[in-house]
Amino acid sequence: MSTDAQKPDSITLVRPDDWHLHLRDGAVLESVVMHTVHQFARAIIMPNLKPPVTTVELARAYRDRIAAAVARQNTHKHPFEPLMTLYLTDNTSPDEVVKARESGFVHGFKLYPAGATTNSDAGVTDLLGKCSPVLEIMQDAGMPLLVHGEVTDPDVDVFDREAVFIDKVMVPLRHRFPALKVVFEHLTTADGVAYVEQAEGPVAATITAHHLLYNRNALFKGGIRPHWYCLPVLKREKHRQALLAAATSGSGRFFLGTDSAPHPKGLKEHDCGCAGCYTALHAMELYATAFDAAGKLDRLEGFASLHGPAFYGLPVNSGTLTLKRAAYQVPAELPMADTQVVPLAAGESLAWMVDD
């Protein structure tokens, strides 16, 4: 841990990427997309729209809508490339994998176990039983599989679903397809960290800022705190510590993925509130706070800017992003379409901010 006297007043990084992002569509997309563009050069775009993005042509159309929204608002002319993904279903065809690889703009297939999270009802019901022909083509093509790593069995405790997923899904998957590129998205447990660190073959993981900064106590601080509710849910402190150690370790297997998820304020503050934390606005401020607290700011560039491109086989960005040590007040809420979205840690002050 560095002393206060040794702590830098600013840090400049190769411009980072977000390897797990929800933008939604329509008016919500218009409202939130520039928060990401302000900080990141590229982002892996999640395909769980209604209806889901299941084909290359649907991904192309969605990509065009994102590009148009950016073009209308990008007054600072920040370069931004949406990296598209397809929603894996029981009926995805091997031909679609070939089209995806040939497209040049589809960079992975997303596995949502059916019912695991927002808009996942069309997800996979039996990965190896239904999708093996597709997974074989993906392995041969070098097309990554991006996994929401939780089982959905209601008999499994919600805090154990990641660990059970490793045993029941990841281990058999890797045994059957050892060369398949797999990203274990939004990792949340020490079990997941240990698995990713030790797994043979091309395996990596994204980690969110909220799982680095908070444990499950944040959900109940002074009452129910719905804006800290996400899936996978926040875990015990020992898991947060394991995630922070992994993110700051310098290992190329761990990289940044915000899982930023815009939900209307009223649907979060609801008798059956939806899962997801909105962090696109202040993602790098949150990550810098976590790395600074661990005394590992020197490892932030690798995690945010270098490890992801290396895993996905993409070039490192040419631009830079500077963060300065200065108080940043997180807004209480933000306009989103015809409603509001509440960012994570709304009303709180962070010690870092992006330097325009």
Image: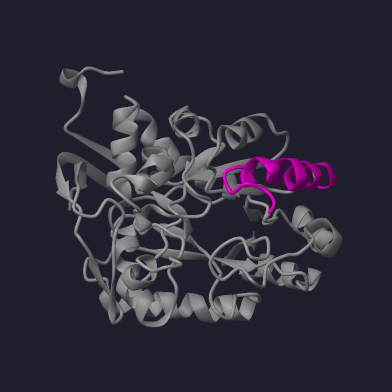
Q: Is residue 297 visible?
A: yes
**Coloring scheme of the render?**
one colour
> Where residue 303 appears, x then y in whole percent?
44, 38
Viewer-closest of 116 and 330 = 116
Lateral position of residue 348 relative to residue 138, left or right: left
Lateral position of residue 114 relative to residue 95, left or right: left
- Establish if 65 lies above or below 270: below
Q: Is residue 179 visible?
A: no
What is the magenta range?
155-177
- Establish if 162 lies above or below 112: above
Residue at 83% across, 56% down? 128
Quadrant location of residue 39?
A: bottom left
> Where residue 352 appears, x then y in whole percent?
21, 41
In the rendered image, residue 46 lying in the magenta stretch gets the answer no
In which quadrant is the N terminus drawn? top left
- Establish if 180 lies above or below 197: below
Residue at 73% across, 45% down? 170
- Establish if 197 lies above or below 213: above
Residue at 68% across, 65% down? 114
Viewer-closest of 40 and 254 = 254
Number of residue marks: 0
Residue at 36% across, 76% down? 28
In the rendered image, residue 174 lying in the magenta stretch gets the answer yes
